[in-house]
Image: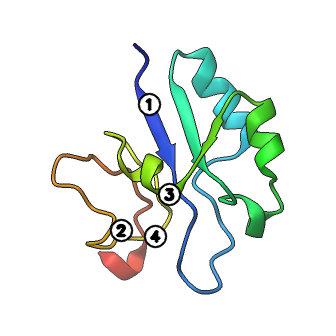
Amino acid sequence: MPQVIGIPKETFAEEKRVATVPEVVAKLAKLGFKVIVESGAGDTASISDDAYRASGAEIVDHAAVWSQRNSWPVNPITIVNARSSTPVVQFISRGYL
């Protein structure tokens, strides 16, 4: 069973980034990972669900992304999304150091 990586849609106002792009999804899939992307996650970055789907990702709803053991958000997670047993990979910015 492949390890699943969840890519959520960002909810911070004015956020235009997404945690990964279709080119990286294809590379992760080649390495044996299963990547799931929340529907609309790439909209603000001009990346369609179809582009993610074509690269090998599965498009899912919000709950499915956050139910995974690994989620990759851009911004800090909220208590609403957090699960105590879910490792989260995030960017580190100077504002948080």
| Separation of marks 2 and 3 at Cα, in angstroms | 13 Å
Q: Do the residues labelled 3 and 4 touch (CB within 8 Å)?
A: no
Compared to residue 40, the image places residue 16 above or below, namely below
Q: Where is residue 38 in the image (x, y as percent from the top left)?
A: 59, 52
Residue 92's tag is none
Q: Residues within 10 Å of mark 1 (few under 14, many from 20)?
A: some
Q: What element carries label 2?
A: loop
Distance from disc 4 to disc 2, alpha carbons, whole Å, reads 6 Å
In the structure shown, which secondary structural element does the residue marked by tag 1 occupy?
strand
Residue ID for mark 1: 4
The residue depicted at 70 percent of the width and 27 percent of the height is 56
Q: How far apart are labels 3 and 1 at the CA level? A: 15 Å
Identify the element where label 3 is drawn.
Answer: helix
Q: Single out the mark in the foreground, 3 or 4.
A: 3
Q: Which amino acid does label 1 sit on?
A: Val
Q: Mark 3 points at which residue?
A: 62
Within-10-Å neighbours for mark 3: few <14, some 14–19, many 20+: some
User: Disc 1 or disc 4, which is closer to the eye?
Assistant: 1
Please say if 70 is above or below 29.
below
The quadrant of the image that shows the C terminus is bottom left
Cα separation between marks 3 and 4 = 15 Å
Q: What residue type is labelled 4?
A: Asn
Instruction: Give coordinates of residue 14: x percent, y percent.
Output: 65, 85
Disc 4 target residue: 75
Instruction: Please give left or right for residue 29 compared with residue 49 in the image.
Output: left
- The kind of residue tagged 2 is Ile
Which quadrant: the N terminus?
Answer: top left
